[in-house]
Image: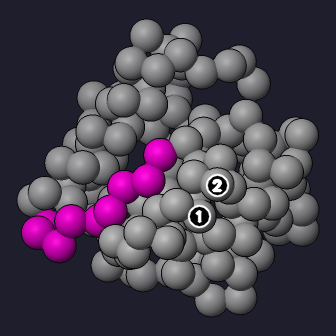
Amino acid sequence: MSDIHELVQILLVEDNPGDVRLTQEALKEAKFRNTVHVVGDGVEALAYLRQQGKYSAATRPHMVMLDLNMPRMDGREVLEAIKKDPDLRRIPVVVLTSSEAETDIARAYELYANCYVTKPVDIDHFLQVVKSIEEFWVEIVRLPSQ
């Protein structure tokens, strides 16, 4: 079981407003107190994680939920940058994307994604998947301290 007893901080990197809303809704219903910080592309994600610019006071997330297909810098580039950065690489990155392409799955794991989840099309299933992700990463997995 995880040692996270305080508020769980989640960085959601997603450019689709509908998916942002659904993910936030699912996480609101989770049994863990959480705060979801949302950024709309990879450039913002790295600025947030590195506490740069308008994100200078950003809280380090316990996990990142990352879409692959975004403007400016896609999720693959973000994942690669996170896992190459000694200060960020221990943050679990859950790829949560609509892509079912085998090449995307393989590439995500080559870049050290912690897991790859395809977004279900059905809204109820989508909500359940997001809840399951949080339960797994907060209740079951033991994460390193910040």
| In the foreground, 131 or 103 | 103
> Quick check: is 104 in the magenta stretch?
no
Residue located beneath label 2 in the image:
110
Specify whether 12 is left or right of 118. Answer: right
Q: How is the image coloured?
A: one colour
Q: Picture coordinates of residue 5 (x, y %)?
A: 51, 15
Instruction: Kindly state the secondary structure of the residue where label 1 is placed.
Output: helix
Q: Position of residue 9 (x, y in %)?
A: 57, 40
Of the 4 image quadrants, the one containing the C terminus is: top right
The x, y position of residue 15, in whole percent, is 50, 80
Q: Residue at x 24, y 49 (%)?
A: 129
Query: Does the magenta-highlighted stretch encompass residue 119?
Result: yes
Q: Position of residue 133 (x, y in %)?
A: 35, 41
Residue count near mark 1 (Cα–Cα under 10 Å), binned few <14, some 14–19, many ≥20:
few
Callout 2: SS: helix
The kind of residue on which mark 2 rests is Glu
Residue 105 vs residue 19: left or right? right
User: Do the numbered discs 1 and 2 sit on residues whose CB atoms are within 8 Å?
Assistant: yes
**Rendered position, 4 above or below 47:** above
Residue 10 in view here: no
User: In the image, which residues are magenta?
Assistant: 115-123
Out of 67 and 104, give the one closest to the viewer. Answer: 104
Residue 36 vs residue 50, the one in the foreground: 50
The residue lying at 47 percent from left, 62 percent from top is 105
| Residue 107: assigned label | 1
Q: Is residue 141 above or below residue 52?
A: above
